């Protein structure tokens, strides 16, 4: 261990780094000098070879002898003249003319000898020419040698892809896709093949039905891609179902003449009824699975609720041809047990609603009621719209907008999920066609509950012309909703991928592996050095590795408005960028209703009320005035004395946990019965005066009674029936001692007509006083309502 630490310290000290750096530089310099020497030797050899060849083949023996004699004597004269001028004063050279006669000529008289001078000039020029050619070839060879040496070195440094996918520029990928699409279109005798595009990258021909996923965190640019895609669909007159939960798409593309909106809070929305979509038990089973979301902890109750809803829905649809969503909602909320039980007779669902187990029946109905609340929001005045019929009609070329307000998404999630699921399985009822193309654009997929038909729809929609575009934030959200295996199946059925920046490590790793890997060949350079020069050297070895094309870190560090794109087929990946486009708002994203929950009483135009609101009337009394007291009805006529009320209270008292779903379901039925009873006996109520301090005495007595109830609920054994009966009796007596305007126990749902829409009026509505009158707290909650029935709790 110490030896290793010593080696590490020696390697990391400043002197060691300097020595290794200098040795590396020296090795590089020596290798460069070696390359230059090689070039010089090759050039010299080439030049001498060219010169010798000229002498051997460009001249005869006489000319070669004359040239050598003259040049050698001239060289000697140049060398010896500075040292001994007298020795070279009469320098002579022996030459031979063309006739073979020998002559002795002074070296200084050679230029004056015409035939000799001409011969020497010609042969010297010929020799110089070929010598220059040799040098030029040497220089050209050196340049070529250097260039190819550089290219070889660069190729060795560059990672080469042997197999697998790769990452290319967007322009290169576009050319590849267009070329392949042209081949496929030509095979089908098509000359024009307009392609849809994502971030400028074309989707290969006939590959829209291979489905697309767009993943990325909030603000990374998913919405811009979808807006551009919807714009293309609209310009080509396509057909699409678009989910808009963030109020992003409707206002930019809505066309009242072609499109349909389904939004319970939008005035432009069409009405809808499940009875138009489901015609038998099998189809009601599909609707119940979409409407009632699965829960791991309540698997039996979910299964029972789906079975009961399937049976009741199919049976009520058979009995009532004009049934609406409200009929289905009222069937589960307000139908008496005997009539409700008649819908289940002689069916498997009857096993889940036994007559001798009211708590179990209440729990099942409460589970169904929780999902059916969203149905009560749908308007019923318009003609109902059928998603199935719209899907089957290929002449319909508009867009079906399934939208809601983000703040109300929790309330409408079951209904929106049901609409989308119906659209998914309705497509598979159409005839198979290669010409049909229906887009399912589901942005914010994680905001919906489980869509039972999504997995099968992705697998089978290609034959029916379905093209899915799924947008979500990260993979773990889908796994939480659909489970690991189903989520994996959903993602694997989408072949076109756009992944933007995401901070989820699991999602980064998944899409890194989804884009693909490649087998690469890398060059590794090793430098050896030592005190002896013969130990210095550089060696290069090739190594093969399998690496991801895009790492998880690269996905996490993407900028907004950019992402990695892969298309179905043997195409490489690319990093695409797109711009933010500000689109004009053609229509409002949502047109809200002017009033809600008014019932049959329209707003008043009384100028004394807050601006644009109606006076708050509680049994004929305006807010701010002392309520007119109502004498309680005869003893035998009180709602507490009614047999049905007593039966419901006894059923409610059997629950140990009053906050359970079964207890809440019974409480809803109690409230409904109280409302009906009050409406029937309101005409018989007589008015009477009230004395000073009426409100204070009433509030104090009620608060004291409520406080006693809360304290007793904490005592041991408080859950038995006798104790709960005593508490209810005390609360009823406390209200009876004072002039209760309504003559009902606390907790009763009281019909309020002419409810003000202003915050000032609503804030005065609920007021609680401490029993000691030392504190007063006004709760500004606005109006509090149960669904759309216009009821308030006091």
Image (spheres, grey):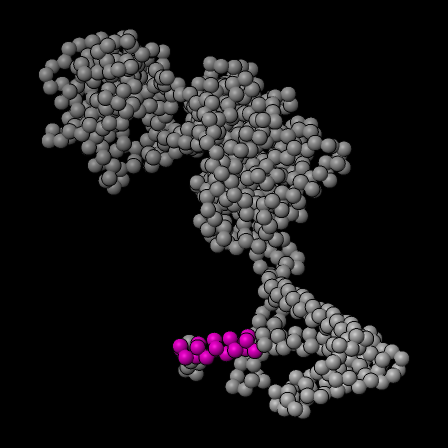
Q: What is the chief secondary structure element of the magenta stretch?
A: helix
Query: Residue at image x 69%, y 83%?
Result: 75
Which quarter of the rendering shows the N terminus? bottom left
Horizontal placement of 424 versus 557: left or right?
right
| Magenta stretch: includes residue 25 | yes
Compare residues 536 and 572 and report the one nearer the observer.
536
Specify start and end residues of the magenta stretch as a single range. Answer: 13-31
Examine the image and state in which quarter residue 778 appears: top left
Near-viewer residue (586 or 92): 92
Residue placed at 43% from the left, 26% from the top?
Answer: 373
In the rendering, at what x and y percent does residue 105 appear? 77, 84
Please give left or right for residue 53 compared with residue 165 in the image.
Answer: right
Q: Which quadrant of the view contains residue 758?
A: top left
Residue 524 position, x and y percent, is: 58, 69
Residue depicted at 57% across the width and 30% down the height: 232
Please say if 162 is above or below 477: below
Q: Residue 348: where, in percent of width, then height?
A: 55, 31
Of residues 447 and 239, the one drawn nearer to the viewer in this rendering:
239
Residue at x 48% of width, y 40% of height: 221
Residue 336: x percent and y percent?
A: 43, 20
Q: Is residue 239 visible?
A: no
């Amino acid at each position: 261990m110490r030896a290793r630490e010593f080696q590490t310290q020696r390697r990391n000290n400043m002197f060691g780094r300097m020595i290794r750096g200098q040795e590396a530089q020296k090795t590089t310099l020596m290798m460069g000098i070696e390359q230059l020497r090689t070039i010089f030797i090759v050039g010299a050899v080439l030049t001498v070879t060219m010169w010798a060849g000229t002498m051997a083949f460009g001249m005869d023996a006489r000319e070669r002898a004359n040239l050598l004699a003259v040049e050698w004597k001239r060289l000697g004269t140049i060398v010896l003249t500075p040292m001994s001028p007298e020795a070279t004063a009469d320098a002579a050279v022996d030459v031979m003319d063309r006739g073979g006669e020998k002559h002795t000529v002074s070296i200084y008289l050679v230029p004056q000898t015409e035939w000799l001078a001409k011969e020497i000039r010609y042969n010297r020029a010929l020799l110089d020419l070929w010598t220059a050619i040799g040098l030029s070839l040497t220089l050209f060879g050196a340049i070529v040698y250097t260039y190819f040496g550089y290219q070889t070195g660069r190729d060795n440094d560059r990672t080469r892809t042997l197999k697998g996918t790769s990452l290319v520029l967007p322009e290169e990928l576009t050319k590849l896709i267009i070329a392949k699409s042209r081949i496929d279109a030509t095979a089908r005798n098509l000359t024009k093949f307009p392609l849809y595009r994502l971030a400028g990258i074309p989707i290969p021909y006939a590959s829209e039905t291979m489905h697309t996923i767009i993943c990325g965190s909030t603000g990374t640019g998913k919405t811009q891609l979808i807006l551009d895609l919807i714009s293309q669909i609209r310009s080509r007159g396509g057909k699409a179902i678009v989910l808009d939960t963030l109020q992003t798409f409707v206002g930019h593309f809505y066309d009242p003449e072609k499109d349909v909106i389904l939004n319970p809070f939008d005035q432009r929305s069409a009405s809808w009824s499940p009875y138009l979509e489901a015609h038998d038990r099998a189809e009601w089973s599909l609707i119940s699975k979409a409407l009632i979301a699965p829960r791991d902890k309540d698997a039996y109750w979910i299964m029972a609720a789906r079975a009961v809803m399937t049976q009741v829905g199919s049976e009520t649809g058979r009995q009532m041809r004009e049934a609406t969503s409200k009929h289905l909602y009222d069937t589960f909320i307000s139908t008496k047990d005997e009539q409700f039980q008649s819908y289940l007779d002689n069916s498997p669902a009857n096993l889940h609603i036994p007559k001798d187990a009211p708590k179990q029946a209440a729990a099942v109905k409460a589970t169904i009621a929780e999902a059916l609340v969203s149905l009560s929001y749908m308007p019923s005045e318009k003609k109902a719209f059928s998603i199935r019929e719209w899907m089957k009609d290929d002449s319909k070329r508009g867009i079906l907008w399934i939208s809601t307000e983000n703040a109300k998404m929790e309330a409408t999630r079951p209904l929106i999920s049901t609409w989308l699921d119906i659209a998914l399985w309705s497509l598979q009822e159409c005839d198979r066609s290669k010409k049909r193309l229906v887009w399912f654009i589901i942005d914010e997929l994680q905001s919906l509950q489980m869509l039972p038909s999504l997995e099968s729809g992705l697998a089978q929609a290609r034959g029916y012309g379905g093209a899915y575009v799924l947008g979500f934030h990260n993979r773990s959200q889908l796994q939480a909703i659909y489970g690991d295996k189903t989520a994996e199946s959903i993602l694997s059925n989408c072949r076109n991928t756009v992944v933007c920046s995401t901070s989820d490590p699991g999602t980064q790793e998944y899409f890194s592996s989804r884009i693909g890997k490649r087998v690469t060949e890398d060059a590794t350079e090793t430098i050896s050095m030592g005190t002896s020069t013969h130990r210095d050297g550089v060696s290069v070895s090739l190594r093969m590795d399998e690496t991801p094309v895009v790492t998880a870190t690269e996905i996490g560090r993407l900028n907004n408005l950019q992402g990695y794109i892969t298309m179905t087929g043997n195409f490489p990946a690319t990093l695409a960028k797109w711009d933010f486009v500000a689109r004009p708002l053609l229509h409002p994203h949502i047109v809200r209703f002017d009033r809600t929950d008014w019932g049959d009483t329209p707003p008043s135009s009384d100028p004394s009320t807050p601006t644009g609101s109606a006076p708050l009337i509680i049994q004929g009394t305006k807010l701010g005035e002392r309520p007119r007291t109502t004498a309680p009805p005869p003893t035998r006529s009180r709602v507490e004395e009614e047999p049905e009320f007593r039966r419901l209270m006894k059923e409610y008292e059997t629950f140990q946990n009053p906050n359970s779903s079964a207890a809440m379901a019974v409480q809803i039925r109690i409230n409904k019965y109280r409302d009906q009873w009050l409406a029937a006996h309101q005409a018989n109520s007589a008015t009477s005066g009230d004395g000073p301090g009426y409100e204070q005495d009433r509030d104090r007595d009620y608060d004291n009674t409520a406080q006693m109830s809360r304290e007793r609920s904490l005592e041991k054994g408080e859950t038995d029936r006798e104790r709960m009966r005593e508490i209810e009796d005390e609360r009823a007596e406390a209200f009876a001692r004072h002039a209760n305007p309504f003559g009902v126990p606390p907790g009763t749902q009281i019909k309020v007509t002419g409810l003000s829409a202003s915050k000032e009026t609503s804030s005065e509505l609920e007021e609680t006083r401490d029993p000691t009158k030392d504190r007063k707290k006004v709760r500004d909650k606005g109006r509090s309502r149960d669904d759309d029935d216009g009821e308030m709790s006091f």
